[in-house]
Image (cartoon, grey):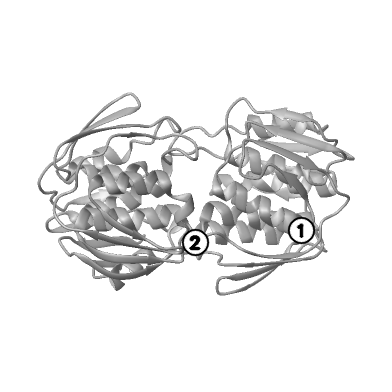
């Protein structure tokens, strides 16, 4: 099992190119199931989750051609309408094949996702929405079995804002008969990116980027070309790294217009930001200032950045408070950061951080994707050596993070 060895204390200097967004790429890949035409994608990130999704799609009969960050999908010969547990258990986003398969072929059998380290992510909203569209759904032996000769448009109000739920129902509704209205829809940029691809494929969607999507079903979709948006979470993670270590970096291939909440807090920390259309220069000298925040749905502060900002807060000049409202178990990095000398206490869904002058390297263990990134940031800022174990979590969502960090001066290496 790979680990990362980090020798902390180096300032970061240079350029970082941001990869395509994991959370946009996964649903967009599933959209290839909706048509027999070629879906040509670019800026697809090199991630474990993407590889898993491509394996899952290939076993349905979807033809997958990959060349670097370019992927071409062709769904003219789908032979299986099932997503088996062996693949679904490693990645909860596998549920996103349910809507497209049901809409196009009238049937789908998808394993219930396994447990999730950061908390429950129920699929009941997916099921409720598909039933409203006319699907007959049974759950048996750990599988969701959905059937419907033809989905019919309706008004769907989800009980909660759900990103994958919105994506699944949107992909189902584009081929449904009549008009579907999705109320309380997720507004995340990754949802919007999927909607733009679907429109390029011939779908009719109004209200993109709002919490009310109006979808007029069409008989079929055709092929299209699309570039996956850049990863706002990866971009903000590198900005947190320079905030913690000091230095001067420029991140390229980014989307500053979808990062307002994170950029506002980074300025509060003391990071000097110069922002262009697709680049951000970040300069940091001195100790970070503490920032208090509360995670919430987009356009609020993203839960996927909570752990990384907490890593910066551990060495801030003062006390801060972090409240997590999205996932109930998303403080598992706290005890690992405390092993590095941080002073963090938790009470329910709130963490209280008292900044210390210096973290000290130690062996730590990653518990989930964003927790692993936060431990890398803490290790970069710590004195001495930090060994991060279980970095397979990191590889799920960050494209060769240690290589990018090496290029800007970090002393970090992958060891077997």
Question: In the displayed structure, would residue 160 be above or below residue 393?
Answer: above
Residue 34 percent across, percent down from the top left: 77, 54
Give the left or right position of residue 133, taking residue 368 as reference: right
Which quadrant of the rendered structure holds the N terminus?
Answer: bottom left
Is residue 173 or residue 91 the one in the foreground?
173
Residue at image x 15%, y 37%? 318
Residue at image x 17%, y 51%? 362
Is residue 86 or residue 179 the one in the foreground?
179
Residues packed near mark 1 inside 10 Å, few (<14), some (14 to 19) or many (20 plus): many
Instruction: Please give the residue where the numbered disc 1 appears in the rendered image.
Output: 201
- Identify the element where label 2 is drawn: loop
Give the left or right position of residue 413, taking residue 90 as reference: left
Instruction: Give the mark nearest the N terminus, 2 or 1.
Output: 2
Residue 52 percent across, percent down from the top left: 57, 58
Residue 340 percent across, percent down from the top left: 17, 46
Question: In the displayed structure, would residue 19 be above or below residue 334?
Answer: below
Instruction: Please give the residue where the numbered disc 2 appears in the rendered image.
Output: 47
Give the left or right position of residue 405, taking residue 246 as reference: right
C-alpha separation, residue under disc 2 versus residue under disc 1: 25 Å
Residue 325 percent across, percent down from the top left: 42, 29
Residue 153 visible here: yes
Is residue 415 or residue 159 the one in the foreground?
159
- Identify the element where label 1 is drawn: loop
Residue 392 picture quarter: bottom left
Residue at image x 84%, y 49%? 105
């Amino acid at each position: 099992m790979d680990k990362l060895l980090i020798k902390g204390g180096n300032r970061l200097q240079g350029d970082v190119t941001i990869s395509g967004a994991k959370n946009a790429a996964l649903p967009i890949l599933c959209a290839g199931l909706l048509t027999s035409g070629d879906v040509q994608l670019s800026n697809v990130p090199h991630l474990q989750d993407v590889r898993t999704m491509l394996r899952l799609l290939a076993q349905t009969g979807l033809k997958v051609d990959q060349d670097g960050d370019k992927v071409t999908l062709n769904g003219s010969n789908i032979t299986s309408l099932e997503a088996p547990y062996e693949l679904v258990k490693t990645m909860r986003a596998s549920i996103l094949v349910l809507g497209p398969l049901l809409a196009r072929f009238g049937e789908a059998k998808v394993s219930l996702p396994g447990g999730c380290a950061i908390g429950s992510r129920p699929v009941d909203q997916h099921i409720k929405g598909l039933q409203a569209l006319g699907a007959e759904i049974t759950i048996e032996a750990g599988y969701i079995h959905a059937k419907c000769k033809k989905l019919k448009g309706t008004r769907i109000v989800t009980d909660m804002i759900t990103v994958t739920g919105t994506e699944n129902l949107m992909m189902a509704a584009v081929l449904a008969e009549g008009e579907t209205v999705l109320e309380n829809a997720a507004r995340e940029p990754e949802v919007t990116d999927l909607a733009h691809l679907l429109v390029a494929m011939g779908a009719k969607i109004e209200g993109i980027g709002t919490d009310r999507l109006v979808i007029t079903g069409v008989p079929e979709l055709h092929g299209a070309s699309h570039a996956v948006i850049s990863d706002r979470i990866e971009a903000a993670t590198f900005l947190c790294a320079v905030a913690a270590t000091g230095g001067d970096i420029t991140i390229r291939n980014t989307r500053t217009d979808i990062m307002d909440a994170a950029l506002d807090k980074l300025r509060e920390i003391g990071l000097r930001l110069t922002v262009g259309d697709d680049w951000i220069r970040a300069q940091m000298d001195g100790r970070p200032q503490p920032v208090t925040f509360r995670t919430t749905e987009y356009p609020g502060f993203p839960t996927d950045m909570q752990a990384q900002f907490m890593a910066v807060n551990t060495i801030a000049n003062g006390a801060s408070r972090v409240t997590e409202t999205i996932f109930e178990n998303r403080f598992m990095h706290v005890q690992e950061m405390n092993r590095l000398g941080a002073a963090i206490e938790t009470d329910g869904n709130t963490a209280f951080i008292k900044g210390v002058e210096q973290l000290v390297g130690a062996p730590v263990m990653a518990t989930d994707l964003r927790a692993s990134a936060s431990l890398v940031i803490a290790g970069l800022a710590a004195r001495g050596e930090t060994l991060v174990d279980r970095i397979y979590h990191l590889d799920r969502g960050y494209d060769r993070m240690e290589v990018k960090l090496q290029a800007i001066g970090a002393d970090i290496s992958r060891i077997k």
